[in-house]
Amino acid sequence: MKLKVTESQIQIMIFDWASMMINKYPELKLMHHIPNGTYKSITGAVRAKAEGLKSGVPDICLPVPKSGFHGLYIELKASKKNKPSENQEWWLEKLKDQGYKAEVAYGFDEAINTIKSYLELNK
């Protein structure tokens, strides 16, 4: 039986990997999570929206310019069975239009490969 790994667990693994790789890729210190999709109370959700939280914004941001891009955004999905929503697709397209590399990554390996490939641009 194959264990199901959640997006949250994968994201924790990605940031653990990033912590271990900071000597090789110092830019990873700037990588951060955008807390969309976190479960909140109704009051908390209303407050977050009033504070500027936007539905569909990708999960991970690396605000480091590389090879003509302003930075990298990743919409993380646990597996290929999970597809980006229409709103997430809209955000990815709009971010690309603004000069960002914006990708969907399915699982840990694909996310790490996306980050490493991005950081190796210009080398």
Image: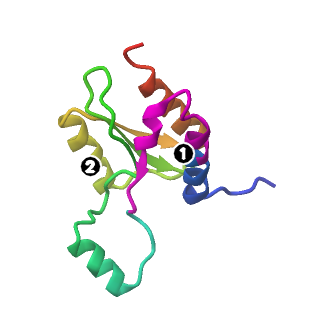
Q: Is residue 3 left or right of residue 76?
A: right
Q: CA distance from mark 2 to mark 1?
A: 19 Å
Task: Tell me the SS state at disc 1.
Answer: loop
In the image, residue 22 above or below residue 78: above
Q: Residue under label 2, please give it.
A: 91
**Point 55% across, 56% down: residue:** 7
Q: Quick one: label 2 or label 1, which is nearer the N terminus?
A: 1
**Image quadrant in which you'd find residue 50:** bottom left
In the image, residue 6 above or below residue 80: below
Task: Tell me the SS state at disc 2.
Answer: helix
Along the line of sight, which residue is nearer the eye, 88 or 68? 68
Q: Residue under label 1, please give it.
A: 80
In the image, residue 25 above or below residue 90: above
Q: Amino acid at mark 2?
A: Trp
**Image quadrant in which you'd find residue 39:** bottom left
Q: Is residue 39 visible?
A: yes
Q: Amino acid at mark 1?
A: Lys
Question: Which residues, given as a range, are shown in magenta?
Answer: 16-35
Whole-percent x, y for residue 44 in the image: 35, 81
Whole-percent x, y for residue 113 in the image: 53, 30
The quarter of the image holding the C terminus is: top left
The quarter of the image holding the N terminus is: bottom right
Q: Residue furthest right?
A: 1
**Point 42% across, 78% down: residue:** 40
Q: Residue furthest top?
A: 123
Q: Is residue 101 left or right of residue 4?
A: left
Whole-percent x, y for residue 56 in the image: 31, 57
**Image quadrant in which you'd find residue 49:** bottom left
